[in-house]
Image (cartoon, rainbow, N blue to C red):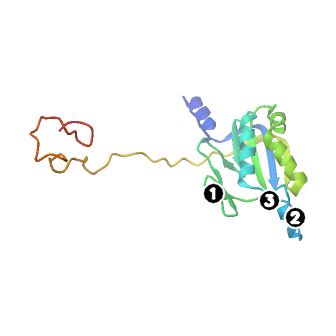
Amino acid sequence: QAARLRRLEAGTGLGRVRGDGVVVRLADAPAKDDAAVTGSEGGPPRVLYTDLQKVANDLWAAGAEAVAINGQRLTATSTIRSAGAAILVDFRPVTGPYEVSAIGPGAMRDRFDDSRAAFLMRELVDSVGLSFQVREVEDLTLPAAPEPRLRYAEPSISPSPSVSGSAVEGSSGPEPSGSGSSPSPSGGGR
């Protein structure tokens, strides 16, 4: 049972994992004095949250069993977003240079090199000067993700709604009970 629990923790991101893998390093382009460069056709000369999303997703598609960004382990509920100029991974800020580490099979590097994300990153290297490197790493260790804070639904405390008054619109007065002509708001008879 303990071995099964460790496998489940590793698979869900709640356990630390070790193995061979790949590290993808992304960094902003060096600062330039010429402001016209920032508007070049390739996009901004800095790493965007969407770049990290693409790299992480294509590492998963290449066979990754575990992925982390700057040491923050990704799980099934992880988010990679921006908040102004900051990039957040699971609502925690990460700063460049960004390292997306993945543990997986030996063919993962070749599969990732053929991915759409790797192609787009190489284009950004040529067009705006971003730094993009992929290297294989032996005996890589990825930390466990923090315990999730899950919320659960609870029943409403207020009483269920009921019809106020017993008159039906258009009638001259209350109908005797049992007529069944006007259901309650909950769909049942009175």
- How crowded pointer 2 is (Cα within 10 Å; few <14, some 14-19, many 20+) is rated as some
Could you tell which of marks 3 and 1 lies nearer the N-terminus?
3
Amino acid type assigned to the residue bearing label 2 in the image: Val
Which residue lies at the image location 73% right of the left edge and 35% below the top edge?
Answer: 61
- For mark 2, give the secondary structure: helix
Label for residue 37?
A: 2
Separation of disc 2 and disc 1 at Cα?
30 Å
Q: Dot 3: within a 10 Å radius of its alpha carbon, few (fewer than 14), some, or many (20 or more) residues?
A: many
State the residue at coordinates (65%, 42%). Answer: 16
The residue that disc 1 covers is 92
Apparent side of residue 112 relative to residue 155 in the rendered image (left or right): right
**Foreground pick, 37 / 26:** 37
Which residue has dot 3 on it?
46
Q: Residue at x 75, y 39 (%)?
A: 59
Q: CA distance from mark 3 to mark 1?
A: 19 Å
Are discs 3 and 1 less than 8 Å apart at CB?
A: no
124 in relation to 108, above or below: below
- Is there any visible trace of residue 7 in the rendered image? yes
Mark 1 residue element: strand
Q: Work out which quarter of the rendered image holds the C terminus and state it.
A: top left
Amino acid type at image mark 3: Arg
Name the residue nearer the viewer: 110 or 136. 110
Question: Where, quadrant-wise, is the N terminus in this rendering?
Answer: top right
Give amino acid for label 1: Arg
Q: Position of residue 19 (x, y in %)?
A: 75, 37
- The Cα–Cα distance between marks 2 and 3, rounded to whole angstroms, is 12 Å
Which mark sits nearer the N-terminus, 2 or 1? 2
Q: Judge by depth and name the residue closer to the eye, 21 or 41.
A: 41
Q: Secondary structure at mark 3?
A: loop
